[in-house]
Image (cartoon, helix red, strand yellow):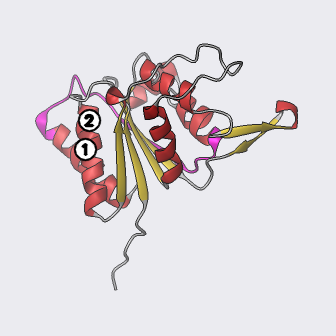
Amino acid sequence: MFFTPKKKKIFVLLAHPDKDSFNCTLADEYGRGAEEAGHDVRRMNLGDMKFDPILHKGYREIQELEPDLVTFQENVKWCEHFVIFYPSWWSTMPALLKGLIDRSWLPGFAYQFTHGGNMWKKLLKGRSATMFVTSDTMPLIQRIIFGDTTNELKRGILWFAGFSPVHVRKIGYLKHFGSTGRRERIKRSVYSYGKKAK
């Protein structure tokens, strides 16, 4: 008797602004693997989304959400597993991804402070996440020199809202050792993660 993995609702976000990037190729491979395994997949490309990435007044004034931000929130609430592909630029996420979070990861959607702001409710519990982070630096060297460059998104954003577990899969040395054979192996690996919804 073969074990059949549970079908999941997966939301894939390509968070590289450039759709012609290797991140896009990897997002394609993940989505292809997930769909072939029978998972229900939704996809958004950050570079296609139209919104003001600046939260001009913080939370002092309501800044109306553009339609793409409303769709993004709906997809996050819909999914059981959230997958983000992005490059590490200057040891952090691209500015446009941070702008997406600033505008959409709002009180009442992702979290709600309680007891005078000392505690908070995680409003997106029951979901897991995976971060695929590409870099031109070997992940171990990047960790030694710069520390944990994924903690802002992993804990400060996803965990804070209730996502658990949050997996981080780092893919490094793309520019200097980006042979066709190695890139094909990376694509196959990401495709396999998609089939397993991991």
Residue under label 1, please give it.
28
- Image coords of residue 96 (percent x, y): 43, 21
For the record, the magenta segment spans: 160-181
Q: Is 177 on the left-hand or right-hand side of 172? A: left
**As displayed, is residue 156 above or below residue 82?**
above
Seen in the picture, residue 5 relative to 135 is either above or below; the reply is: below
The quadrant of the picture occupied by the C terminus is bottom left
Label 1 SS: helix
Badge 2 amino acid: Cys
Q: Is residue 176 visible?
A: yes
* Residue at image location 33% in from the left, 80% down from the top: 2
Helix, strand or loop at label 2? It is: helix
Dot 2 crowding, Cα within 10 Å, few <14, some 14–19, many 20+ = many
153 drawn magenta: no
The alpha-carbon separation of the residues under discs 2 and 1 comes to: 6 Å
Tag of residue 24: 2
What is the x, y in percent for residue 127?
Answer: 55, 53
Res 68 label: none
Residue 125 position within the rendered picture, expressed as x and y whole percent measured from the top left: 63, 51
In the rendered structure, the answer to whether residue 145 lies left or right of residue 122 reads left
Q: Is residue 48 rendered to the left or right of residue 107?
A: left
Q: Camera-side residue: 109 or 92?
A: 109
Count numbered badges in the picture.
2
Please tell me which residue is depicted at 22% across the width and 44% down the height of the picture: 187
Give yes or no for contact between labels 2 and 1 (Cβ–Cβ under 8 Å). yes
